[in-house]
Image (cartoon, rainbow, N blue to C red):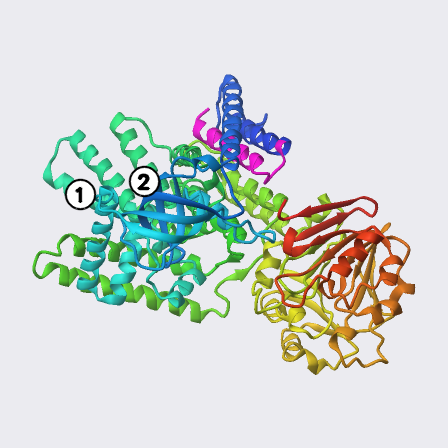
Amino acid sequence: MRRPALNLWVGLAFGIMAAADRIVLWLALSIAVGISWVMTEPWTGLSEALGRREPAASRGTALFLVLISFWAGSWLMTRQEQAFRTENPVVVTAVGYVDRYSALSEEKLIYCVSVHDGEDIGLPETFRAVIKPEVHLEVGRYYKMTLSLQSAALPRNPGMFNYRQYLDSRGIGFQGTIDRVERLDRGGHWRIFLREQVRQEILKRLLAGMGEDAGQLAAAMILGDTADLDPELLAVYRQTGTAHILAVSGLHFGILFSGVEIALDRLKLPYKIKKICLLVMVLSFLGLVGLKSSAMRAAGMLILAVALQASGRPYDRLNVLGLVGAGLLAFRPVLLFDVGYQMSMAAVYGIAAILPALIKPSPAYNNEEGRRGLKLLHGPALSLSVLAAAALPAAVHFNTLTLISILVNLPVVFLTGIALPLAFITVLTSPLPGIPALTGWCSSQILQLIEVTVRFAENAVQQPSMVVATPGLFTAGGTAGALGLFALRRQRAQVFEAGRLQLTAAALLLTVIVFSLPVEAWLQPMDRVRYFDVGQGDAALLQTRGGENILIDTGDGRTFREMDQLLLKTGVSRLDLMVLTHPHLDHTGGAEAVLKRLRVGALVISAAVSPEAYGSLIPLAQSVGTELLAASAGDQIQLKNSRLQVLSPFAHNRATDPNQASIVLLFVSGEIAFLFTGDITARQEYAIIDGIPDLKTILKVAHHGSKTSSDEAFIAALNPGLAVISVGRNSFGHPGAKTLETLERSGFLTFRTDESGCVEIKTDGTAVYLKRMTE
């Protein structure tokens, strides 16, 4: 077992995922054991191709390690999940210090509580909270506060930003507001004071030596704080895939480490003293930038590299990566779901496992020209390796793949490797005359060149990034498995004797197959409807077992501006149909963003109103090549294995009230009927009763549960099943008490999106399965 740390990481990671309900227990354990089995003892016949000679006993040891670490990961995550939570605000009086201001918002700060009066309600003895003060509070100072605390809210729609998980990954348990604050006379927290003074001094020296814009950018690179950067510039870096230079990671630690090592070599210090100094430097820099996942990973790998070198043991980057990654998960298991952790681990995996497969040493290169060719290939191969490895977390978290980053990162990383050392020199030599002015000017010019490069790259390509939907569990697993093939090697110079070209082609082919085929639909042959929580508005996504995606209304673009992002997070990058039941903003507000970002096959509008009533959406749809359909009663939209029936409106009746012009759709799945009613009133309900089959009905309650809809006669005519009311905070009294009583009296089990979040209903045509986001 050459790489036990990888087995340790695999067990921990899948144990955590199982405990967090990201994957069912039996499947998580099976995958973890299977990966360990493959990594430890290759299949018969493959062993010679891989050059592996492993003793059979190592398999048993590896499986034991995976099982123990799986249990440990499950236990750690379960303990995290069982931490004290409070959905309702609790008032406590606490004493603590201000750790720092939040990276997400300069208006919020992190308050570290050391003493409080909330033990009787279950609050932990010490905890951290993110709060928004009305006045500026000094970092490192102790304050006595009366706080109103509660746990951060969970996402109300699938795949959306999980603020509670984000806070958990940073060791923050609560959020809240300050009712009263009193500064204490006792001295501040010395470590926090020192850290803040050093950070402010670094920023001051950079601004003095480089100017405001370049100094802020250099400070962001050195300290990892992008709060003061221009948001538009940040967006450019993200669009071109170069934002990683602003996150403190291996590049930054490596530059500082190399510089300090060169300086210590010049001083001719004893070997052990030099290594101790390097370790102190790494830990000090980590303390300065904070315990961010990418910084912790980089620091951990450097510390292990120094320790292995000092002990005379070989350095295996994949093994060290697995050990550091496992250590971070043991420290804080929820980091597994943190984008910084995933991107950092993936990038190093690409360098350690994929890069050697692309530039494998060969006897053909044992000459000067060959070595020169390898050097030229190294840069593009490095960018491609990191991009390939980081593609999966990028698709999951950002729904983009930045293909141009392969090229633009070549000059950007090279220039960063020059600008950062010069910025460090500017800080260190600030008291001296002449030198900081020269190095600061040179660094600022290079940083300006970096900005020009990324802006040119963004403007030179019409679409610098490609929009992708969040991959499903099986798609993500297949892609990860394809990338995992590269880890099945013994050392850097022995990739696969069968040939790196075959390996790369096999991995690429497997990834393309997994991404292009509707694997999720095949494995779960059900019809599914998600009634999204979009506030006071309507939006429902119908996904058929035939693989079609149909969006019925798009919510209110004013209070809910994320319809396009929500679809991508749901795994949808293309809509076969987008139905806008009627031209009211709480149903059409998100349509513009969807048309601009996703591919839409056809836009269905009501035939009972003029197309002009939909405003700019019609010309926008035509400009992007979306077919336009006007629907009226009697129309049928044919799908692969079923059809959508239009029950209303009647085309010959031009409605003066857009609500009365609402499209009513019926979708039948076996013995289950899904009825989408828009905002119709009682008058339209009477008109469609005869068109509704006597099947168990899943009803989208009309007009957010308004008392002017859901008439008793109409509801009584339906075969009661489930009812969903799409509603948010409003001044109209939705849903009406009469409507709720009518539904209950008729036997409907009713769910509200303002209480349940997104409501998902699946059926195989007989059984019905329901899931609420707030469960």
Q: Residue at x 30, y 51 (%)?
A: 182
Q: Label 2 amino acid?
A: Ala
Q: Provide the residue designation for mark 2.
A: 299
Looking at the image, can residue 372 be seen? no
Residue 219, placed above or below residue 662: above
Instruction: Please state the extent of the stretch shown in magenta in the rendering.
Output: 1-25
Query: Counting residues from the N terminus, which is met first, the one under dot 1 or under dot 2?
Result: 1
* 663 lies above or below 470: below
Question: Can residue 182 be seen in the rendering of this structure?
Answer: yes
Extreme residue in the left direction? 433
Amino acid type of disc 1? Ile
Which circle, 1 or 2, is nearer the viewer?
Answer: 2
Whole-number angstrom distance, CA of label 1 to CA of label 2: 18 Å
Left or right relative to 178: residue 199: left
Count of residue discs: 2
Looking at the picture, tell me which residue is in the foreground, 699 or 760: 699
Give percent across and percent down for residue 586.
65, 69
Residue that badge 1 annotates: 262
Quarter of the picture containing the C terminus is top right
Q: Looking at this view, is 254 or 545 the one in front?
A: 545
